[in-house]
Image (cartoon, grey):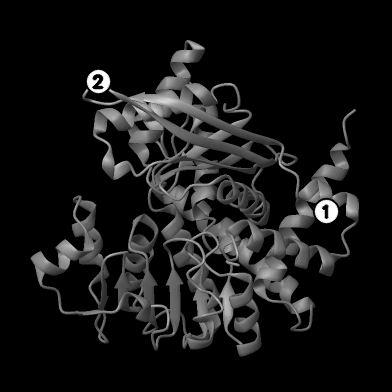
Amino acid sequence: MTESMLDTVLSQFHQAADQLGLSDDHRETMTAFKTVFHTQFPVARDDGSFDIFEGYRVHHNVARGPAKGGIRYAPMVSLDEVKALAMLMTWKSAVVNIPFGGAKGGVIVDPATLSTNELRNLTRRFTTEMVPIIGPDSDIPAPDMGTNAQVMAWIMDTYSMARGYTVPGVVTGKPVSLGGSAGRQDATGRGLSYVLQEHLRDSGGVQGKRIAVQGFGNVGSVVAKLLQQEGALITYIADKDIALHNPAGVDAGAAAAYLAQGHSLPQWYEDQHPACDPVPLDSVLIADVDVIVPAAIEHVLTEENAGLVKAPLVLEGANGPTSQGADAIFKERGITVIPDILANAGGVTVSYFEWVQARQYVRWTEERVNEELRRLITSAYQTICARQQSSRGQATLRDAASWIGIERVVEATELRGIFP
């Protein structure tokens, strides 16, 4: 039977709980979900008809603060996936030590099949359904797969209409002109770049390192562009339709700029004729490079291909890209994995900065945002490394990150106590 993402996340938790000697009471508390919201709602189509859509919003744990997590629009959205992602958000926020709990949401839809008007209708109706459980002090959504700053603007406006006044802190990742933060759009990719630079700082840095990026959306394109600027060779880039290779380095910056104009990676290859060659999609993750960056979807590294991976380092840009079985193979083979709950925490970190700015009605410069992001995420990396080293080489970086995240949530739970 295929391992689901929720299976993987729960297995990772229980493995860490075993290593920490966590009590049964704490295990039950940490694997319970505070709120599981499921709704079916009609959306008007442009032709006057309507369709019923299905959506979810899950709060995992809020012991450390308001629930925080993205909303995705995708055909594969399921309750188990949303639960898994909400739990990951709890650990991720704790790992970088920001005062949020974990949440996630989604609607089962392919947004490419909707007109702009239909997408707006869907967003406003889904937001209306969620009004009782979201808010700047309770649950703060953000963009995810299939959503963007415009979708967040519609959510903020719909929620504000229900309250009777503007509430900029109800979402993050919104347009800067509506109270969004400078630097938020690139934050996840920038955080990945900072983590990798810190990881390689004592071994020559990223200069000249050959890197394969699987997934060339908002996360993959940004980290590829930034690492190229630092002197890395981005030898492979890929999305769901095409994979491109150049041993001397694909021009990731040019590709990212072209995609930012609303085009696709296949269009860039066809229209711009870059110096690279198409290769099989499944070759990117097993390419002969120094670092692979899975930055697309979950479970792309599995027991089937983990034994074929040649790179000594995996930087997890996506949420849950590595199955439990693949993790075990990587540990046995000595392949280092920088886990998602640290590596891609740049997005939630800058979301925290945006939320703080919205609550205080102030604006930070992009330089300050990036400086604070580097400080927090590199500090988290150093804490995790120190914890791993204290295990005398027995723990992986994922183990150490999980221990720290879980311990911080358990500590908050113990300090607050169980009500009543």
Observer-nearest residue: 158 or 184?
158
Q: How far is the residue under mark 2 from the one under mark 1?
A: 50 Å
The crowd level at tag 2 (other Cα within 10 Å; few <14, some 14-19, many 20+) is few
Query: Residue extending furthest top?
Result: 164
- Work out whether 332 lies above or below 15: below
What's the residue at 48%, 60% (across, down)? 191
The crowd level at tag 1 (other Cα within 10 Å; few <14, some 14-19, many 20+) is some
User: Which secondary structure lies at badge 2?
Assistant: loop
Residue bearing mark 2: 48
Q: Nearer the viewer, mark 2 or mark 1?
A: 2
The kind of residue on which mark 1 rests is Arg
Q: Quadrant of residue 149?
A: top left
Give the image location of residue 196, x and y in percent: 49, 72
Q: Earlier in the sequence, mark 2 or mark 1?
A: 1
Give the image location of residue 150, x and y in percent: 33, 35
Q: Which mark is residue 27?
A: 1
Give the image location of residue 134, x and y in percent: 57, 28
Are discs 2 and 1 less than 8 Å apart at CB? no
Q: Quadrant of residue 108?
A: top left
Give the image location of residue 225, x and y in percent: 31, 66
What's the residue at 54%, 49% (across, down)? 349
